[in-house]
Image (cartoon, rainbow, N blue to C red):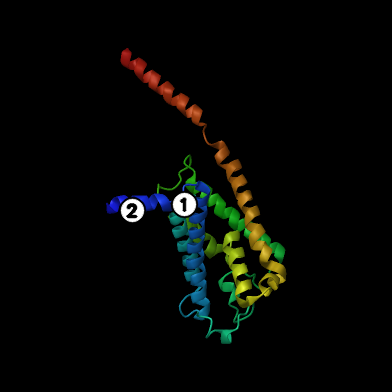
């Protein structure tokens, strides 16, 4: 009886439309990414690097990405004693950088844009290689781990200029949150209007990375039909030799 009630409850509560299921999965996956990634940044900044450093931030985002992919891939405060409670966007005691990316001093918008294009392009190249079944790829079930390690590689090699947002969802949403949570519109004015760079740059970089992988790797994979013809030819030869 209890099992039947559970099944009835599950049927009533389950979502059958794919678009809604994918939305819920992506929502939860992004939450996990931001939770662990921005959490590692918060712990480092708010403890003044006593309980964290750049490497722990890299691991925070690496694990955040990995767990988010494992979670969603199958379907599709502490401020009171810091800076006297002031919500500062830039400077020594800035806390807005916990949530969104900001450029280092003297980094131009153009250089930052190129930085994001290259970083995101590298990520997409790695992801496509990892999930490409015609390439070596990654063992089944290990894809999120390897993608997470790709994020770690980008973090330890390309984080100097502005961190490595390389994802509009990782930067724009948290920036909107800080704007509404007390940091104000300065989060959009800082860095000479930096906010659009980690939004547009990853979009361009993602397309560029996909095009490069297609032109240099995927386009040159042996055709499936040709492989099947070769297999059938070998099979026919084997059967003919057997008959003889």
Tell me what residue is drawn at x 66 percent, y 58 percent. Answer: 200
Residue at far left of view: 1
User: Could you say which quadrant of the image residue 82 lies in?
Assistant: bottom right
User: Could you say which quadrant of the image residue 103 lies in?
Assistant: bottom right
Q: Which sits in the foreground, 98 or 15?
A: 15
Is 131 placed left or right of 190 in the picture?
left
- Where in the figure is residue 121, as x and y percent of width and height? 60, 53
What number is the disc on residue 6?
2
Between the residue at mark 1 and the residue at mark 2, the CA separation in whole angstroms equals 26 Å
Q: Residues within 10 Å of mark 1 (few under 14, many from 20)?
A: some
Image position of 212 with respect to 169: above or below:
above
Residue at far top of view: 244
Residue 142 showing in the rendered view: no
Q: Circle 1 is placed at which residue position?
A: 73
Tell me what residue is drawn at x 59 percent, y 82 percent. Answer: 93
Looking at the rendered structure, the secondary structure element under dot 2 is helix
Point out the frontmost of discs 1 and 2: 2
Q: Residues within 10 Å of mark 2 (few under 14, many from 20)?
A: few
């Amino acid at each position: 009886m209890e099992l039947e009630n559970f099944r009835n409850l599950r049927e009533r509560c389950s979502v059958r439309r794919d678009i809604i299921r994918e939305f819920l999965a992506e929502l939860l996956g992004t939450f996990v990414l931001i939770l662990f990634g921005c959490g590692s940044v918060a712990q480092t900044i708010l403890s003044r690097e006593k309980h964290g450093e750049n490497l722990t931030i890299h691991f925070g985002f690496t694990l955040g990405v990995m767990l988010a992919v494992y979670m969603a891939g199958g379907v599709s405060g502490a401020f009171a004693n810091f800076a006297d409670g002031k919500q500062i966007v830039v400077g020594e005691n800035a806390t807005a950088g916990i949530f969104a990316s900001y450029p280092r001093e003297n980094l131009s918008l153009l250089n930052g844009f190129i930085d994001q294009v290259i970083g995101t392009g590298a990520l997409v190249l790695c992801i496509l290689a990892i999930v490409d079944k015609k390439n070596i790829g990654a063992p089944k079930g290990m894809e999120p781990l390897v993608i997470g390690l790709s994020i770690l590689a980008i973090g330890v090699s390309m984080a100097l200029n502005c961190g490595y947002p390389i994802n509009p969802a990782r930067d724009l949403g948290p920036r909107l949150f800080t704007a509404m949570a007390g940091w104000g519109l300065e989060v959009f004015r800082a860095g000479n209007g930096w906010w659009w760079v980690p939004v547009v740059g990853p979009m361009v970089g993602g397309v560029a990375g996909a095009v490069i992988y297609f032109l240099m790797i995927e386009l040159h994979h042996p055709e499936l039909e040709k492989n099947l013809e070769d297999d059938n030819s070998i099979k026919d030869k084997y059967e003919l030799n057997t008959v003889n």
